[in-house]
Image (cartoon, coloured by chain):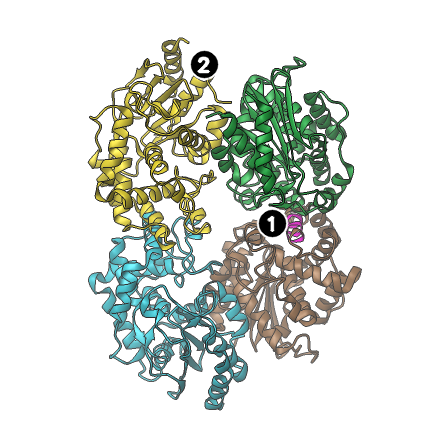
Chain colours: A brown, B cyan, C yellow, D green
Amino acid sequence: MDYPSILERIQSDITPLLGQGKVATYIPALASADPHDFAMSLQLVNGESYHIGLSDKTFSIQSISKVFMYEMALSLFEESLVGRVNVEPSGNPFNSLVQLEYEKGIPRNPFINPGAIVVADMLTSYYGASAEDSILHFFKNACNDFSITINKEIFHSEYTSGYRNYALANLMKSFGNIHNEVEMTLDTYFNACSISANTTQLARSTLHLACQGLDPITSNRILTFEHTKRINALMLTCGHYDASGEFAYHVGLPGKSGVGGGIIAIVPNTMSIAVYSPALNHHGNSLIGTKALELFSHYSGHTIF
Amino acid sequence: MDYPSILERIQSDITPLLGQGKVATYIPALASADPHDFAMSLQLVNGESYHIGLSDKTFSIQSISKVFMYEMALSLFEESLVGRVNVEPSGNPFNSLVQLEYEKGIPRNPFINPGAIVVADMLTSYYGASAEDSILHFFKNACNDFSITINKEIFHSEYTSGYRNYALANLMKSFGNIHNEVEMTLDTYFNACSISANTTQLARSTLHLACQGLDPITSNRILTFEHTKRINALMLTCGHYDASGEFAYHVGLPGKSGVGGGIIAIVPNTMSIAVYSPALNHHGNSLIGTKALELFSHYSGHTIF
Amino acid sequence: MDYPSILERIQSDITPLLGQGKVATYIPALASADPHDFAMSLQLVNGESYHIGLSDKTFSIQSISKVFMYEMALSLFEESLVGRVNVEPSGNPFNSLVQLEYEKGIPRNPFINPGAIVVADMLTSYYGASAEDSILHFFKNACNDFSITINKEIFHSEYTSGYRNYALANLMKSFGNIHNEVEMTLDTYFNACSISANTTQLARSTLHLACQGLDPITSNRILTFEHTKRINALMLTCGHYDASGEFAYHVGLPGKSGVGGGIIAIVPNTMSIAVYSPALNHHGNSLIGTKALELFSHYSGHTIF
Amino acid sequence: MDYPSILERIQSDITPLLGQGKVATYIPALASADPHDFAMSLQLVNGESYHIGLSDKTFSIQSISKVFMYEMALSLFEESLVGRVNVEPSGNPFNSLVQLEYEKGIPRNPFINPGAIVVADMLTSYYGASAEDSILHFFKNACNDFSITINKEIFHSEYTSGYRNYALANLMKSFGNIHNEVEMTLDTYFNACSISANTTQLARSTLHLACQGLDPITSNRILTFEHTKRINALMLTCGHYDASGEFAYHVGLPGKSGVGGGIIAIVPNTMSIAVYSPALNHHGNSLIGTKALELFSHYSGHTIF
């Protein structure tokens, strides 16, 4: 397939839309992003890769880190995850407390904030103070790029002003579902959210999810086949908060978004994809990024359905 | 692949579990089902089919009819569906009124009761008194079997005692999202629920969903490629009420269940599947049927992820 | 106390506000009310009465009938009310289904729609087809005026278009908390809502609630002392839907409003009050009527606190 | 009236019930209370007082402090309270986050936890680090007893383990409705909750609420007449969380409970009452204390209705 032409066609289609949506403003470091930025990278399982736009520009991966944390948790804790975090779509915004209170502090899935905070808590119990380093290392290793860093300015902003995440963590602690001090667990969580990467790196780091858990370039096994299926299933049903159904309906690929403006998507057995555009729709997903993936699915015919 | 052996292995695995779960009791005609009944049918796109258990025993397809009704609605109304029924997982039980009230009478998706009632209302507006015949005809045609009938005893039970469905329809009517008389729309809806079929017929009738909308045996086009993708996406994210995430996570195939005990599932480009076992889990999905599909996915390796 | 002067002062204060708020529009017969209409009647326990404005103009008492129905139910069923309708403020709008679903079809209190529908159902079981006549008779007797009638035009409007009340009744029936056919119970309920009275009659009909259940003029006992206390307590905590707290805070008297624009209030041992002004605030209570009662409490110093 | 006999009759009636209910266990200092303890004090406006049981035994007043904090807030901030805390019954448990999220961080009333935390925040803004001393002083002054102290052990327990209150405060801070650091505001809040008093002192400290805001013994004005009415109205509609309606229905007096086992109640123009019994019903109100007040209302005939 002629991927370079498809990418050019997508860029041409989305250019008139740049400027729509709203950059996340809850922390200054995100608010300064340029809503006209755009990048898209395709990483094929055969090692080829194709890029368009600002594919070298790093941004905060935010909730995309939830995928990597849950990959680690599946490998480390599999059985113990039962009863601490479920695998159902929530039908609610990413940071809602309502459902969490009705359901006694057990989050619906690991790809909404409370679920990822529980996962961060489990990783904190296991790795202690080095939890953040372990998550970063997992990401670097999956990416096969050891230059990746955590943006400490963003971390600091979130750590000091993420009141709703403190609310979620304290609510779960009141139900006994956070085992460490709230501050320690959120330290891990906010560090993971603050990993900086560009679309080239993001696409590369998720290539194993298109390849049954194996990195086809280095031949490193990152995840088992069984766990890879589950990650992809979760991304399909829960990867875009309360717009997950829309994404499945219009794009038809497993994916995960972050409020930093990034989205990853997987074409099983074929490729991993990363897009970046920081202006968000009202569900908190990249508006242009979602559109670009919809166009990609349409032009390439790639879909799991 | 040796499908007959896989089916035998599944039957052997599930036999000790028969009797678990509870048969739906809200109408007498369903309550009399035998919880030990089991059937499973595979219909391959190459025309071959494999069966085990009571694959000739008919049962009430119930919510599986929601798939056929929405296929018809996609073909007839595409654009007009926007604003009347969404495509998001609900995160709530199939017949909940809570979300419907918060969201002003617009159902989350067409595979929960209120969503299917809206679809039935649209079909009733279009076809008038012949709406039920048109739905039955669509099903017969997809199945290429014109002997299929509606079980009028079940229809009558639901029509006279389905108070919660009356509550849902009246609530939506108060928001202006039901255009016909509540009784007329529910007449259509309950008739569609009361279609009787066996697993052989159900698997056959959904074969086009494994084949881009084309019936590969008759070469009839039942649905466009684009609409077929959407039906499969919806079944994956919304096909099992508030257990849709679990089904995607453990089975990894698009599917749709009904309280009569049937479940259909699709392996794109390969086959359609139907299972039957009337005892339900607490989400209202066939307990053994779900288990059988999980085993099938495991033994065959078939998954979309 | 110089009640005529107080009434004049109130009328002068509210005159500039007439026209604010919105007349109920969900049925034509209510929508045609003149938002500039105003009336207020004081009925003292010593037999004196004072009136200002259109105190002879009849209107639909609507939810004020919930008080009379619950008085009858307390006398007839006392113990059997437990488990069918509670006595807690709901914190929700008058016709919400959300709480009702969470609480398994048991309404929070008899002064919101679902609670009054359960009471109507109990009266229907007891009186059969004459339930509406029995309610009307109770009202006439309390009023000592046998000329009062039911407005059948309003009844008919509500009976044919009250979809949300049908939704509430069907939801409760699905939980087993409606014992008659939904249509029969709602026939009773809508008839009670459609009783027509003016403020003179309304104040007179509730005088016994200011007098430990005894009509001080005729010496008829309408209610026991114990039940009278409970009616007044319920009016204070639940009489104005989700504005009951505001009413207690600013007016400080037990009261009950109706969407027809009427409000009754009780000064224990002193008087009963009725006001009428059909334009409503966003809680569904008469905007001017509420204001008039607040001024009355302020000018007269009458309060239970 | 023969109050000593009434008190003896109450004690005799409740003795067989002692041991029912459950002592609050969420902090060790409360968990050690003896569920058989009982005390009741009547403080008449004429200066007489009557006591039965352990009326000298101090306990943690907990949520009863919400009344004193709101009295201070009414005097200091009246107008500014609008938009920060409402005056409606919540219909939900005392520490629910659900409603708070739907209503954008504005608590329903000042007598549930989030409402009192907002009030504590306003007092913290006004008094700074001396907020807790100012609240304690208000209480001592109302009681005319300057020996009262804060139990620092209880304060410390709540400050280090009150996760749900941290969740509430952080959620409100995310909506901009907490102006100080969460820890500072909760320091004030938990100190107020940890005031220790016995029933003699509690009854004395609330006597002004039975007397239009004036302390009839010292002739000190504690509160204006208008504000006193509002406090009593709020206690009636919101004083017992989601059992406020039951309390109004069965007791018929304004009151406020605390999880320490205390309840205060007011008979306007006549007396203030305090009861103590640490075992709670499932709403978090003293089970025996509620029963004792119901008996008192019954035997004395005192009611506001």
Q: Which residue type carries mark 1?
A: Ala
Q: Mark 1 points at which residue?
A: A24
Residue A197 seen from this side = no
Judge left or right: residue C250 versus residue B46: right
Q: Is residue A169 magenta?
A: yes
Q: Are marks 1 and 2 in contact (CB under 8 Å)?
A: no
For residue D272, side relative to residue C302 (left or right): right
Residue nearest the viewer, comparing C51 with D76? C51
The answer to whether residue C232 of the structure is visible from this angle is yes
Q: What residue type is labelled 2?
A: Tyr
- For disc 2, the neighbor class at 10 Å (few under 14, some 14 to 19, many from 20) is some
Residue B4 horizontal/vertical position (percent): 45, 90
Hey, which quadrant is residue C283 in on the image?
Answer: top left
Highlighted magenta segment, given as a residue range: A165-173
Q: Quadrant of the N terminus of chain C?
A: top left
Q: Mark 1: which secondary structure?
A: loop
| Secondary structure found at label 2 | helix
Q: Where is residue D226 in the image (x, y as percent from the top left)?
A: 54, 19
Describe residue D90's horizontal placement relative to residue C199 as left or right.
Answer: right
Task: Identify which residue, A259 or D203, lies in the foreground.
Answer: D203
Q: Is residue B184 magenta?
A: no
Toward the right, the furthest residue is A129
**Residue A231 image point, x, y percent:** 59, 69
For residue C38, the mark is: none
- Residue C228 vs B202, above or below: the answer is above
List the residue tagged with mark 2: C299
Position of residue D21 measured from the top left corner of the image (x, y, whole percent): 60, 45
State the predominant SS element of the stretch in magenta. Answer: helix
Q: A280 above or below D291? A: below
Of the residues tagged 1 and 2, which is closer to the observer?
A: 2
